[in-house]
Image: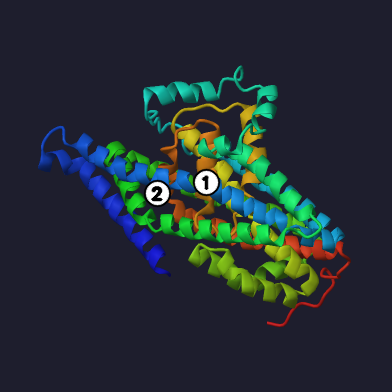
């Protein structure tokens, strides 16, 4: 367990304890009417964290997407392997996000919480966000095209940033000389933004303490049940996603898909315990080759999957976004949810290696649909517990993808002898 993880756990425990104590006893010790002052003070801390998250969205999405697409020329060199891999990633992404959307509606973990919208003005803005008269297909299509990338970044218009990044990345990759200097600058920019993100996440324990303490001090013991329903519902959804991945793998690889899952148990446990799928990458690559997947396929599919096939993280983004809308009593139309699915399909790509990347994607999604940004604090309080599950799921999803693509390439992974213990 690293130091940041340790402090996050301490912050969670301390936030719960202080929040419950304040709910029952704060005004008894400090006088009647003092609890709102406490809530305001905690809100300052959480607002600062939210502003830090918003600060990094635009440059982080731009640099990571451009860098990822600019390097996609390697997929063109591999040819058919790249096409098959991307096809599988798209199918897996659609399945992951769709399962999250369906399960959050079935379980409804946020319904009944009835959180008030932060401000009256924001209430009207959120209400307008779900007005289908305002949200037409024509307006959506024209809105995704930026008139100015500077304006889009200033307003954190995530989809416009993505569109511009797609054009830039594709243009760079198509140049004869591949613009090595520009790629180097973008790569360095992405590394810098990843480092800035890691600095921002160092403040996560403080924000988690403030978010938990404020929620419990304000709403009391009732919100504990909401958190339990949210965490439990998400892990149930992950279990369903695992089942879908195993069934899909079985259709192409046969019974040996179960052997693969048993073989990668060590990197899966490593990803779960460290809440980082990247930490499991070296061991996963080694075990995939031991399973019978050629190095040519494994060394291509796995790293690409870490950028474009984070199944657990994608499902979490849709599950958590609708949970936040439920908590504030906001109804999102079917058309908006389909749009959100397509938006997450793109914005979740190229975020590999970003600490708490899902929080950044969710923050951008909330802003796009004018959902209350304070909703991010609801999931921030328990994000570490959920990050463990989705990191392990990312490892499983990319391992299954590698086996399926290897089978499509004619490698007999479905007939290979079982690896030695």
- Give the image quarter of residue 334: top right
Badge number at residue 209:
none
| Residue under pointer 2 | 381
Q: Is residue 231 left or right of residue 410?
A: left
Disc 2 secondary structure class: loop
Disc 1 secondary structure class: helix
Density class for disc 2 (Cα within 10 Å; few <14, some 14-19, many ≥20) is many
Q: Looking at the picture, how far across and down is residue 240, in whole percent?
A: 63, 50
Task: Report the front residue among 331 and 120.
Answer: 120
Residue extending farthest bottom: 420
Q: Is residue 408 left or right of residue 391?
A: right
Residue 309 appears in the picture as rendered: no
| Residue under pointer 1 | 57
**Marks 1 and 2: which is nearer the front?**
1
Residue extending farthest right: 410
Residue drawn at x 76%, y 55% as measured from the top left: 173
Q: Is residue 281 left or right of residue 71?
A: left
Residue drawn at x 33%, y 53% as measured from the top left: 206
- Earlier-in-chain disc, 1 versus 2: 1
Residue drawn at x 56%, y 56% as measured from the top left: 390
Residue drawn at x 62%, y 69% as measured from the top left: 281
Q: Looking at the picture, how far across and down is residue 29, in whole percent?
A: 11, 43
- Give the image quarter of residue 224: top left
Report the quarter where the C terminus lies.
Answer: bottom right
Q: Is residue 242 above or below residue 374?
A: below
- How much space separates mark 1 and mark 2, taking CA atoms? 20 Å
């Amino acid at each position: 367990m690293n130091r940041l993880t340790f402090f996050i756990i301490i912050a969670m425990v301390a936030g719960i304890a202080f929040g419950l104590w304040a709910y029952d006893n704060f005004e008894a010790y400090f006088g009647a009417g003092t609890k709102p002052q406490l809530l305001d003070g905690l809100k300052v801390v959480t607002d600062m964290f939210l502003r830090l998250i918003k600060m990094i969205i635009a440059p982080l999405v731009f640099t990571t997407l451009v860098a990822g697409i600019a390097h996609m020329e390697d997929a063109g060199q591999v040819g058919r392997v790249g096409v098959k891999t991307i096809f599988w990633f798209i199918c897996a992404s659609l399945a992951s996000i769709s399962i999250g959307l369906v399960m959050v509606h079935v379980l409804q973990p946020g319904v009944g919480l009835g959180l008030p919208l932060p401000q009256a003005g924001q209430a009207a803005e959120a209400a307008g966000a779900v007005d289908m008269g305002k949200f037409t297909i024509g307006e959506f299509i024209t809105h995704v095209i930026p008139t100015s990338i500077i304006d889009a970044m200033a307003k954190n218009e995530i989809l416009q940033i993505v569109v511009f990044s797609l054009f830039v990345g594709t243009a760079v990759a198509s140049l004869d000389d591949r613009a090595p200097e520009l790629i180097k600058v973008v790569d360095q920019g992405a590394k810098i933004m990843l480092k800035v993100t890691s600095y921002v996440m160092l403040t996560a324990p403080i924000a988690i303490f403030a978010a938990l303490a404020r929620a419990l001090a304000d709403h009391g013991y009732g919100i504990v049940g909401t958190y339990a329903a949210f965490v439990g519902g998400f892990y149930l959804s992950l279990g369903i996603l695992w089942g879908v991945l195993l069934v899909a793998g079985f259709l192409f690889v046969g019974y040996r898909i179960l052997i693969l899952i048993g073989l990668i148990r060590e990197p899966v446990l490593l990803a779960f315990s460290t809440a980082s799928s990247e930490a499991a990458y070296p061991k996963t690559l080694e075990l995939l080759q031991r399973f019978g997947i050629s190095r040519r396929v494994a060394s291509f599919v796995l790293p690409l999957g870490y950028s474009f096939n984070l199944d657990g993280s994608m499902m979490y983004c849709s599950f958590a976004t609708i949970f936040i809308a439920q908590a504030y009593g906001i109804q999102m139309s079917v058309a908006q949810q389909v749009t959100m699915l397509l938006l997450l399909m793109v914005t979740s790509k190229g975020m590999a290696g970003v600490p708490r990347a899902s929080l950044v994607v969710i923050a951008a999604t909330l802003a796009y649909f004018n959902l209350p940004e304070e909703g991010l604090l609801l999931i921030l309080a328990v994000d570490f517990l959920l990050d463990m599950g989705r990191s392990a799921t990312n490892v499983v999803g990319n391992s299954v993808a590698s086996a399926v693509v290897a089978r499509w390439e004619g490698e007999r992974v479905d007939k290979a002898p079982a690896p030695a213990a």
